[in-house]
Every structure is written in C-alpha cells, then in structure tokens.
Amino acid sequence: MSEKRDYYEILGVDKSATPDEIKKAYRKKALKYHPDKNPGDKEAEENFKEANEAYEVLSDEEKKSRYDQFGHAGVDNNYGGGGGGGFSGGFGGFEDIFSDLFGGGGGGFSGFGGFSGGGGRRNGPQRGADMRINITISFREAAFGVTKKIKVKRREACTHCHGSGAEPGSSKKTCDQCHGTGQVQIEHQTPFGRVRQTAVCDKCNGEGVIIDKPCTQCHGMGLEEISRTINITIPAGVDTGSVLPLRGEGHTGAKGGSKGDILVFITVKADNLFKRDDADVYLDVPISFAQATLGDDLIVPTLEGKVKLKIPEGTQTGKVFRLRGKGITRVNSRGKGDQYITVNVEVPRKLNRKQKDLLKKFDEATEDSQNMLQKKKFLDKVKEAFK
C-alpha cells in the first residue's frame, strides 16, 4: 500500500472508542479476514495485516496517545511499518484474542506472510520499552526554553552478568526441546479447520537456551533497574500538551536490543501577568480617566523587559495595541509571535465632594461638544425611537 490508512477507519471505530470497543472491532475484522478462512485471497491477507497493525497501536495507551497527536509519524519507530507486514514491539492483547478465536495459547498462525502473534521467537534482540515522564515548567521557561535535570529508574544491562543472565563462570546450553529456536509447532482443530500454530517453547520459555545457573543479581533476566540523572533540554515555545521525545534514553532492550525512548509530557503553569494563545501573548493594562483623555507614555512589561507604549489622546477602554515580535518563539519555525496590550479605563470610586463637583462641571462643559459625539448620537437615536 502506497499510503497508510487511518487506524480508526481500518477498525471502523471513532477516536472516542473505549478499549473494549476497539478490541471488539478488531476481533470482528480478524474473524472476517483471517487467511485460514480466506485461503489464497491476497486482499483478505492484506486487510488482516492492516487490522493487526491498527490494533497493535490503538490497544496500547501510550502508542495511541502518540498516534492521536502526530498520526503515523508518531509511531513509525515502534513497528515494522511499510504495508503492515511486521511489528517490532509487543502485541498487547493479541494473545488472548487469538486464544479466544482459534483455541490456541496465543501462538502464531501459518499461511499469512509469517505473522507470529504472541508466540514468536523471544531469543532474538528485543527493543526496550518506552518511558513516560510528566514535567511541569513555568510560563517563562516555556517561552525561553530551559534545561532540567530529572531522575529516572530504567532497566539496563545487569552489572553482575553483563546482560547475559547467567552467573559469571556458569554456562548456557541449547534447549533440547526446541533446538534453540524458542518455538514449537502445535496443531488445533478450529471452526475454520485445522490450524497450525507456532507457540513459545515451554521448556526454555522461548529463549532457545537454558541457563544452568541464573545470575544471582538479576535472576536470569539480564537486566536490572538503575537510577540515573539525565538532562532534558526543553526548547523555547513549548506549551501544555507538547511531547518531547528523548531517543534512546528509555529501557535497555533484552538480548542486545535497542533502547526505548523517554517521552516527556509537558505542562506549563499559568502566569499571573501574561496570557498566551499559541505564540502570541496578551496583557491587560489599567489606565486612568485622565491618561485615556489626555494621552500618556506608559511603561509596560513584556517577556523580554519593559518597553514604552504611547497612549494617544481620547483612547477608549478596550483599545488593543500590538507589539510586533514580542511574543513567544514558534517551535520548529522561524520568528516569534506578537504581544497584544488591551487598555482598560479605570473609573474612580468613592470620590469626595470637591472631586464630584469638578466632574459635574466638566460634564456640563462637554455636554454638547464634539468630545462627546458618541453620547450625542445615542441620545438622538433614542429621541427618534420614541417619536
């Protein structure tokens, strides 16, 4: 297939579908397109593989989150890609689904391009699992970027056995049941006929080898949990919901497999002065009646420091001024947003008698002048309406 289809479209579910609904939809597709039910039908085989690929992503909460945010690009590093033929990660709920459908133990099925489900070989390199970290930063750290130190606990090669899983000085031997393949062949009778499955060897647990004396530190796993402090460089312009991938910083893979990633989910705290919309910054500034009437030069804050803003005579409340390039850096693109300043004329409260008398005289002096043009137009409209 030259272009991947939407995974939700493949399974016929909405983005709001629950895990049970996704599983049910996949089960229906698997029954319909299973190659043992459609022998020789290449289209059915491709549809089956396509459904497998969609379910492998949508059944995994972390992969589904990346897919919802970035589409196929968000999960390209976690499966074999292409036309949906192969997968590099685990299969999550495939094992129990195929066990229900075909009466097996979650093993592989022959006859459709080598798909091996949950019963594939385990003695080859396995990619390490990804890790998710939530981090909260300030508004200004998001605007300018910041480097943070974080502590993580991740699985790394055992320092005692150097990842072999065997106690130093001991040896491994090839499993005599599967002859080192990690797999055995099992046949089952299903409603669709006899199905041959590739299952995990129960003697070596799919490893292909048997350890005489497991490592006393990692108990034969070859991996141990180690605490590390790593630096995270957060670029300028990130916002709440941004996901920063740290490639190769996740758990170490088994059997010499590549490391997983760390996915940093960012939350930005609100600022007590500025508000944000994408790369633009907004600020409300109160001014006095006299400043609005006579005009003034205001000193206003920006993210980069204070600037002078000229308020012309007769400025009305709600007037918006624009400061170009005083916003936030746009992530992965050039330039910055702008800062918008809204001035609000503050009406004085609790005036004394002298102040009230002066305002009344001022109001009388401007009643019929052009300075009160909007008020005059309004009163004229009211008189016209009640004629």
Image: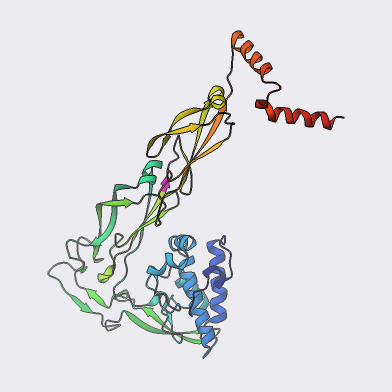
**What percent of the width, then of the height, locates residue 318?**
58, 34
Q: Is residue 196 left or right of residue 38?
A: left
Q: Is residue 329 above or below residue 83?
A: above
Q: Residue at x 56, y 69 (%)?
A: 24
When asked about the image quadrant of residue 306, the answer is top left
Q: Main secondary structure of the magenta part?
A: loop
- From which residue to which does the magenta span run? 267-272
For the point 14% across and 71% down, which residue is it? Answer: 170
Residue reaching furthest to the right? 387
Q: Is residue 358 above or below residue 367?
A: above
Q: Residue furthest left?
A: 169
Colour convention: rainbow
Q: Is residue 42 magenta?
A: no
* Most foreground residue, 21 or 356: 356
Residue 267 x/y as whole percent: 42, 47
Q: How many marks?
A: 0
Between 128 and 122, the one lying in front of the other is: 128
Q: How far from the left and from the top, in percent, is residue 106?
A: 44, 75
Farthest residue, direction top: 353
Q: Is residue 270 magenta?
A: yes
**235 is higher (above) or lower (below) than 15:** above
